[in-house]
Image (cartoon, rainbow, N blue to C red):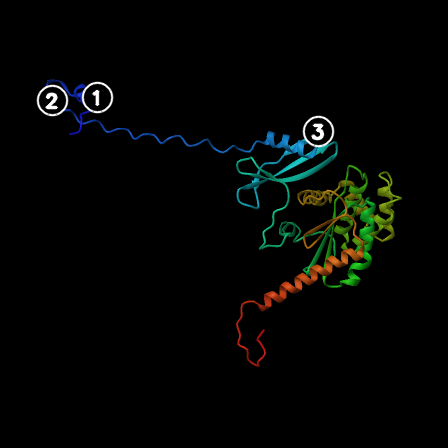
Amino acid sequence: MKSINAAAVAAVFLFWPAHGQAPKKAAPKTPARPAARAAATPAFNAAAFEAYVRHLLLWNDKINVKVSPLKAGPMPGYSEVTATGSFGNVSLDEGFYVSNDGAKIVRGSVYDINQSPFVREQAMLKDLKDPYMGTPGAPVTLVAFSDYQCGYCKEEAKSIRENLLKAYPKEVVYYFREFPLDQIHPWARAASIAGRCVHAANAAAYWGFHDWAFDKQQEIRVENFKPKFMEWAQAKSLDTIQLGRCLDSKATEPAINRNVADARTLRVTSTPTLFVNGRPLPGSLAWNQLKVIIDWELKHAKDAAAEADECCSISLPTPLPAKK
């Protein structure tokens, strides 16, 4: 025989209604609220991120740091963020990936094995409206970010101009994009604007200006750029009045600003920087080095096309040639 719980019996008498009435039905209970969820994962803390990056990169208090808003990253669970360090007129972008809980930071490149390693760069360097030479739509695209006052840019530009179309008359297209380093090259922006003025007025004359500006690096100064530019334009029978107005009003500067913005997004930090089918190549390359890379890209494009041709067909081993 099971024993009776005295506490339970006491509870019955305690809640039994007076005068022998049967107990009323208990009112329906209000559903219990679900237990509070665990605390949310920590949100991205921009101040903590800045402090960490300052320590990582040795950016002291004299360097102003701006942290960009988060944007979707290339891999699940991570967002992309840029830290921009500035000192005077000099600024530098550093890209990072931050985990969704804000606890992990990745610095580097993320690749998708099913895509080109340079798919991001290729997306930004297509449908360009910049001055070019070669064949648009060619298998290899070269995009230069260059500065007219940069000595290394002069060397690379001269090498490309002398050799590229001779070696690759139809296989390569080369785009020239201005990236004036205003902090150290005071007349490079004026030359960039002037070159775009020439291109807008007479595209065929552009490469003549390009070669002239690099050739005259040692002679050009901030104060004498315009008269020397007008002298060159007059010698080439160009409309000096139109070009002078264009230069003075900085009518083509928005194109230069777009190039600078794109260069920063592409993390270009020095001139010259050349992109070969999206592959970034900072620094001046000797022609024989550049040729090896171009040949590599041409072979890669040829192999990819051959692989595509072989795809998606079946055949039996008969003496008949395979259909193409």
Mark carried by residue 21:
2
Identify the mark nearer the N-term, 2 or 3: 2
Given the current orientation, which residue lies at the most extreme right position?
A: 219
Numbered circle sitting on residue 42: none
Mark 3: amino acid: Asn
Answer left or right for 197 relative to 262. right
Is 251 located above or below residue 313 in the figure? above
The residues tagged by marks 1 and 3 sit, at their Cα atoms, a distance apart of 71 Å
What percent of the width, then of the height, locates residue 13? 16, 20
**What is the quadrant of residue 297 in the picture?**
bottom right
Q: Earlier in the sequence, mark 2 or mark 1?
A: 1
Quadrant assignment for the C terminus: bottom right
Q: Does residue 73 appear anywhere in the picture?
A: yes
Label 1 belongs to which residue?
7
Which quarter of the figure has residue 102?
Answer: top right
Q: Which is nearer the eye, 16 or 273?
A: 16
Tell which residue pokes out farthest to the front in this image.
1
Amino acid on which the number 2 mark rests in the picture: Gln
* Identity, as a three-letter code, of the amino acid under mark 1: Ala
User: Of helix, strand and loop, which one carries label 3?
Assistant: loop
Rendered residue at 67%/31% (across/down): 55
The residue carrying mark 3 is 60
Report the Cα–Cα distance between label 2 and label 3: 83 Å
Q: Is residue 252 above or below residue 38?
A: below
